[in-house]
Amino acid sequence: MNWETGARRGIRLAASAAIAAAILALYYLWLPVNHTTVALSLLLAILGLATRWGLPEAILASFVAVAGFNFFFLPPVGTFTIADPQNWVALVAFLVTAITASQLSVRARRQAAEAIGRRRELERLYALGQAMLMTGGLRPTPRDFLNLVMRTFEAPAIAFFNKADGEFHRSGPAAFGEEELRAAAERDEPLVDEQRGTALVAVRLGGTVFGSLGLAGVRLSKTVLKALANLVAIGLERARVLEEASRAELAHRSEAFKSALLDALAHDLKTPLTSIKGSVTHLLARGPGPEERELLSIANEETDRLNRLVVEVLEMARIEASKLHPDRQPHRVSSLVAGALRELEGTLQGHPVSLDLPEGLPPAEVDGDFIQQVIKQLLDNAVRYSPGGSPITIAARFAGGRLEIRVADRGRGIDEQEQARIFDKFFRGREARGVPGTGLGLSIAKGIVEAHGGRIWVASEPGKGSVFGFTLPVYKGEVRA
Amino acid sequence: MSAKILVVDDEPQIRRMMRATLTGSGYQVDEARTGEEALEKFRAYLPDLVLLDLNMPGIGGLEACRTLRASSDVPIIILTVRNSEKDKVEALDAGADDYVSKPFGMQELLARIRAALRRAPTAPESGPRSFATRDLEMDFETRRIRVKGKPVRLTPKEFDLLRYLFLQGGKPVPHRELLQAVWGPDYGDESDYLRVFINHLRKKIEPDPGKPKYILTEPWVGYRFAAAEEG
């Protein structure tokens, strides 16, 4: 209690005694009435003092009233007769009134003060929530939140322990130790230290623990502390989501940029090839002489080769940029194989192809274009690296919840060292020298199969032939088309 | 008289090559450099067929295709460096009749042009000449279709597809057979063409395209026409 409130209390005590004395004087000197009226008037005054100012004032007034009442009104007038039971009744009545009334009013006043306090807390929480939402598209940091909380709750000191990165943020005088904050993050209930005027509360959202918050120099109820911690947690979560969204946006943009770049590259490389091929094939169709036909055919074949190279290099770039997005649809293995065989018709060069595709295979859920390309690549490999006329087998089976497709040849085979590297980019085996190719085909096939969540492998015995196999996901939905 | 072809491409060398080869193959040729110019030229030149590039500055090929298709039945062949299934379906969805990826051999393109210009004979030699249910009327001689009494416009390929399916009398028609009957003998593997065109047809003639009652899918086989009155 400081000097000012002490002085106020002194004045009030004096005034209380004066009021009791004034009532006594009023009735004694100017208004002669019976002493019941005097007693009731005094009682009213004490009741008023007790509710208005408090217990000490009412008690003092009670004593003054009893003394005056006894001296001036109760017979024998002019003397203090404590022995008279009327005195006792009056004193007890005054005191009981004083105590009861003051207690009631103190309680009422305290409740009112609490209600106001709670309202202020709620107003602050609301203001904090609003301020947090107003941060808009910016990505607020924990420090921003601390400053907001400090400003809104007028807290002289604040501390935050961020569990995610183990960092401590503080503003104002250091009121909390690191251990204290770390422990608070794991505690369910807020910890309020009345003596130090500090509060510690865990910052959580659902099951996620963000850390803990310490406030010094403010008195907040546990409910409000929890709500405050919740708000901070929501704010942090929102900041995290915003951060994630902007990172995803960035990744998306860079992916879109790569994709656009590859598209532009494909366009610029293929456009001149289109002019060349169109011109050359037109001339070829005009019935040129044997010499011209030979040269035009070379130009035409080389255009195709260049085009294949462009396609393969760009496809490899797409696979490496993880830009391969298979458009998965249900496809029958038999029609995928048939499609690949149709496109390779001219290049099978007399290799008999036998199919081992059992009835009742489930459909595959794949991008038809891509998987046909894989089958073509494996067939193309089989043709290139096995003697003309040797048989090629395409077999499929359903095993372990996946489809498995194998392409087997009776070629020269691949030795073990080369088997390990055969799916590497630009790798070409010893046998491959002199056979046209870029060394990209198998690594593209691998990229495609892996983009479908499958795997590709080779088994080979030099001199006997090779088997390339890969797995595909099975379509599990209803068959519509 | 030889057919008139409008070549739309922003690359001058491609236009030069196309003009030389197409003129050499007996077609009349006009050129446009952008989608906007194509729409203008189309009104003035009235070509029998449009060869349309996709990658162009301005409104681009797809938009030009949609705009052309909204007002005309002219056959449109898309020529583009893109060759994914998705691009193909997108182009067909925009109203193109065919799709050729660059670079192409001239013989292939000429075959596609002939197929696009070709119409199935107007009146079939045998079989019914018209068909009518409560909400669908088809007259094969005048190539007119009415749905719930309102005339509906079909592109020539859509019409030929519907008629071929109808003439098989409810028998399932395999993809390959349908493609060869409607597009021509060089076709057969383009089952995505069928998917898109059947979708268009269903949108135009079915009361509920999601639950078709005339054009039914035979899973893994093809399509068939159901002349069912009920439903």
Image (cartoon, rainbow, N blue to C red):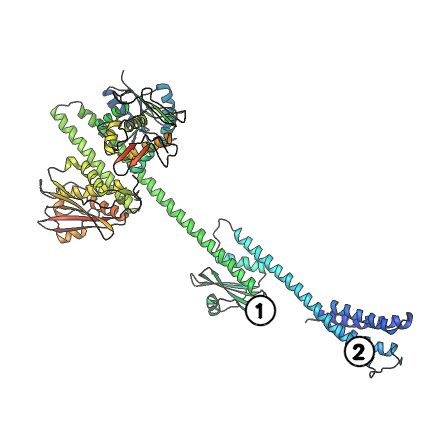
Query: How many residues crowd mark 1 within 10 Å: few (<14), some (14–19), many (20+)?
Result: few
User: Toward the viewer: A192 or A167?
Assistant: A192
Q: What chain is tagged by disc 1?
A: A
Quarter of the figure that contains the C terminus of chain A: top left
* Residue annotated with mark 1: A197
Q: Amino acid at mark 2?
A: Val
A323 relative to A209, above or below: above
Image mark for residue A89: 2
Q: What's the CA distance linking mark 2 and mark 1?
A: 46 Å
Mark 2: secondary structure: helix
Mark 1: secondary structure: loop
**Image coordinates for residue A460, horizontal then vertical, percent:** 13, 51
Of all residues, the one furthest to the bottom in this rendering is A83
Please identify the quarter of the rendering in which residue B136 is found. Answer: top left
Q: What chain is tagged by disc 2?
A: A
Query: How many residues crowd mark 2 within 10 Å: few (<14), some (14–19), many (20+)?
Result: few
Can the viewer see residue B74? Answer: yes
Q: Amino acid at mark 1?
A: Gly
Please identify the quarter of the rendering in which residue B69 is found. Answer: top left
Numbered label tally: 2
The reply, left or right, for residue A286 in relation to residue A53 is left
User: Toward the viewer: B181 or A328?
Assistant: B181
Image mark for residue A433: none
The reply, left or right, for residue B64 in relation to residue A205 is left
Q: Residue at x 51, y 58 (%)?
A: A232
Please identify the quarter of the rendering in which residue A69 is found. Answer: bottom right
Of all residues, the one furthest to the top in this rendering is B1
